[in-house]
Amino acid sequence: MAGAFKTPGFEQRSEAPLLEFVESERRVAEAARYLAGGVSSNFRLGIAPTPLVFERASGPYLFDADGNRLIDYYLGMGPMILGHTPDDVREAAGRQMASGLLFGGQSGIEAEAARLVCEMVPCAERVRFNTSGSEAVQTALRLSRAATGRRVVVKFDGHYHGWFDNILWSTAPPAGANAPVAGSRGQLADAGADIVALPWNDLASVRERLARGDVAAVIMEAAMCNAGAILPEPGYLEGVREACTATGTILVFDEVITGFRVGPGGAQRRLGVTPDLATFAKAIAAGFPVAAIAGRADLMDLCMQGVVHGGTYNGQAVGMAACVAALRRLQQPGAYDGMEQRGTGLMQGLRAAFARAGITASVAGFPQVFHVAIGLAEPARNWADLRRMDRARYVAFTTALLRRGVRALERGVWFMSTEHDDAVIDATLDAVSGALREI
């Protein structure tokens, strides 16, 4: 399929007028009278040239307040794996809305969603639903400590597991950091007392730390896809799995990004290593606020043995209907083929475009979620490598892309959907050529 896209010698013949975002800028400034910073998440701040305001979305496109149509690789920061406003998901949610929104009890559709998760995900013997990945991670940590009677949690530099005080550590640590680094002002220092942050893809450091016998859980993105799409080195996940089993440590995969995105069984099925617990969100419900924790029955059943897991909106019926519709689509044979083929073609096209422009860059990851790092000649293997990317130049690149009608995350991650067809990929590569000439 990659041959269907622009050839390495392709040069854009002419360029349309660059887009402007004056109305978005005005509306964000106006909203700041009532919304702190004009947004409801810090991860929407600092976007160049301005945070955007959107009027509607369809397929691979966003339509903003200035009337611009943008090819979208943010995809809601990952959830919109079926593109924007997928008919089957909207129809399922609409049918449920006609019957009820929130019952303060169980709905039949919730059990069906749980059955599908257990059917698709290798580690999933039981499931509980949440509304955000941050909440699901908290459940995983609580279950791990209850099961082991231990306190310490090992995480990895550059891995993100939500914004709560007890886990927002070393998500972007500076060079030379030899202790966990808090991610926010106002974060309690003692909330990180039981956190150990290690370099990823370093099996020896994991084995050495687990040998002390006091670690409740090792939590990691099975492939490091929040900061950069870094794959585990051969044998690394298998080695961590073996070390956890040998020391009675709970292995937790944070699949909030990779789950149901890199394949119907997530990264754990694709990479062939099964954790004890795993967390999911984003692609699980194609844009609805649904998250899940899944794992071994003996661990999950601790929720009936004194481990509290709650939430008013857990298993909310409309979200569950959307979840079922999304998972049924993703479970179909061939559901990922187009993303695999077109994502591979886009990655190849990006590499060729950077080479033509004489700009050193790495394009690495999965076809459904990959990372572009200007300044890296080889794919990163951990956070220390990612720190060396030229972030200022990359933001200049994404800003130039945005003015040419393509929206990509400033941190380097690109998300694909089922709706990014050949024509969209070609248009993207056109914009890339122009943006690279600009920078």
Image: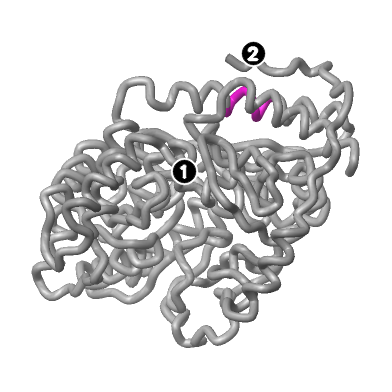
Q: Are marks 1 and 2 in contact (CB under 8 Å)?
A: no
Name which residue lies at 61% across and 49% down.
228
Image-quadrant location for residue 429: top right
Q: Which residues are magenta?
A: 343-348
Q: Which residue is mark 2?
A: 4
Residue 42 % position (x, y): 59, 69
Measured in 3D between alpha carbons, the distance from the residue under mark 1 to the one under mark 2, in whole angstroms, is 24 Å
Q: Which residue is mark 1?
A: 80
| Magenta region includes residue 286 | no
The amino acid sitting under disc 2 is Ala
Between 423 and 221, the residue placed more toward the observer is 423
Residue 88 % position (x, y): 33, 35
Foreground disc of the pair 1, 2: 1
Name the side, left or right, on which 163 lies relative to 158: left
Q: Secondary structure at mark 2?
A: helix
Name the side, left or right, on which 207 lies relative to 345: left
Residue 183 % position (x, y): 58, 74
Q: Main secondary structure of the magenta part?
A: helix
Lower position in the chain sequence, tag 1 or tag 2: 2
Q: Which quarter shows the C terminus? A: top right
